[in-house]
Amino acid sequence: MEEVKGHAILDAQTIDECVIDQDWGAYSPQDHKTWETLFNRQITTLKGRVCEEYFTGLKTLNLVAETVPDFEKMNQNLRAATGWEVVAVPGLIASRPFFTMLANKQFPAGTFIRTPEQLDYLEEPDIFHDVFGHVPLLSNPSYAAYMQEYGRAGLAAMDHKGVKFLARLNWYTIEFGLIKDNGTIKAYGAGIMSSYGEAKYVFNNPSPNFLQFELERVLRTGYYIDDLQASYFTIDSFDALFKECIERPFIPLYESCRGKPTLSPFEITDSDKVLRKGTGEYWKEFPVTKNKLK
């Protein structure tokens, strides 16, 4: 199993209770060395497998291997690109402040970094997952617009019992999304960007399915948090993702999805547009029961 992906839903918190100082000067030489190790390993792994917008974002934000990013310096470049900023938080935060921050063009990022013994697995998102995985694409206007509207949709979902469905959308786009890039399927999800094992598995292992993104299919599809993915959903572009997700009314979809059974990422349905049919070999060794799906 690779590092944890996504954000948990915790008890109610206010934004003021969530925001902390990054205290960049407190990072040790070992912390910077760990960042460098993770950064260089992942850049090599992702070469040729990631959408061009991601690498453009790394350059725009001037993210480099040598040091843990200083949020204050990074935010100068991010604000200039799209008006977004990264806000330091102590770790996983509650749903309402999380969605509120996104709606206000603020991305909450943890400040701690894993130890050398945790390079391949971590139970909670750290600064490498949050910043290296998520933040570069926030310099892209189309992706940044989607993230802001996702935050607004999340706030509305809390009032209409739809957070479970928005969590699935987050999982299959923001965390584990694939995108068509000049005829080639590449990755953009942060859970792939920041995970050494997942990045290799997606394109080197024939097990997972690549399915065309379809909103209701995604909202109804459960996900399994404790291992690699069985299916990945592929968008045509960030503009297409925005159009399909944000320009459609979510609340009626929640009502519709609640009345239908949860779909499995381990099975292909008759209505799926299959871009690559996986062998499923990896998952034959690790069968998962439906009640373990989120």
Image (spheres, rainbow, N blue to C red):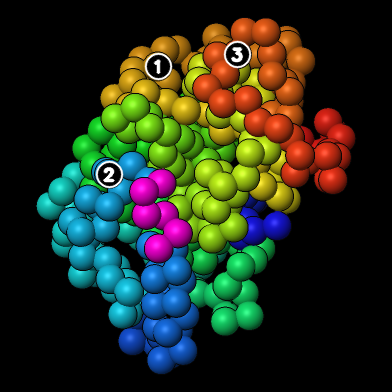
- Give the foreground label among 2 and 1: 2
Amino acid residing under circle 2:
Glu
Give the class, few, some or many, for how many residues have Cα within 10 Å of label 1's Cα (few <14, many ≥20): some
The residue carrying mark 2 is 52
Across and down, in percent, residue 198 comes to: 58, 52
Amino acid residing under circle 3:
Asp
In the rendering, which numbered label is found on residue 188?
A: none
Dividing the image into 4 quarters, which one contains the C terminus?
top right
Residue at (22% x, 50% y) in the render: 56
In the rendering, which numbered label is found on residue 272?
A: 3
Across and down, in percent, residue 35 comes to: 42, 76
Q: CA distance from mark 1 to mark 3?
A: 16 Å
Relative to 224, residue 86 above or below: below
Question: Element at badge 1?
Answer: helix
Q: Earlier in the sequence, mark 1 or mark 3?
A: 1
Left or right? Give the position of 276 relative to 138: right
Residue 47 placement: quadrant: bottom left
In the rendering, which numbered label is found on residue 244?
A: 1
Question: Element at badge 3?
Answer: loop
Asked whether residue 63 is in view, the answer is: yes
